[in-house]
Image: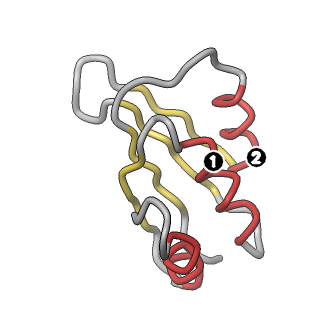
Amino acid sequence: MPQKKGKEKRIKYLLSLPNTFAFYESPFRVVKTLKKLIDLSEETRMVAVVREISKVYEEVVRGDIHEVLSQLENRDSLKGEFVIVVSGLK
């Protein structure tokens, strides 16, 4: 996912697809990216945010995008590598 230039355009394109999609995101941008997904999506999507995928301290937060965002915003800090999985169109 582009960090700045073209990010919104890429997200709009991915949200228009019927497929589920996944992408890596920096811990510093996870919350901001989830907010952008909410702003650009025409419907509430189910998401899974996976921290440290396939490692000892793997953690998964899943649910509708608003619930997941709320859980992540309430944490003191986010560390590690994150993968965001977004459901396709219904």
- Residue 32 image offset from top left, x and y in percent: 63, 47
Distance Cα–Cα, label 1 vs label 2: 13 Å
- Residue 74 image offset from top left, x and y in percent: 72, 22
Which amino acid lies under the numbered mark 1 shown in the image of this protein?
Answer: Lys
For discs 1 and 2, the disc positioned in front in the rendered view: 1
- Residue 37 image offset from top left, x and y in percent: 65, 62
Name the residue rendered at 29%, 35% in the picture: 53
Q: Which mark is residue 66?
A: 2
**How many marks overall?**
2
Helix, strand or loop at label 1? It is helix
Q: Which residue is mark 1?
A: 32
Q: Which residue sits furthest front?
A: 5
Name the residue rendered at 68%, 50% in the picture: 65
Q: In front here: 10 or 47?
A: 10
- Residue 24 image offset from top left, x and y in percent: 36, 51
Which amino acid lies under the numbered mark 2 shown in the image of this protein?
Answer: His
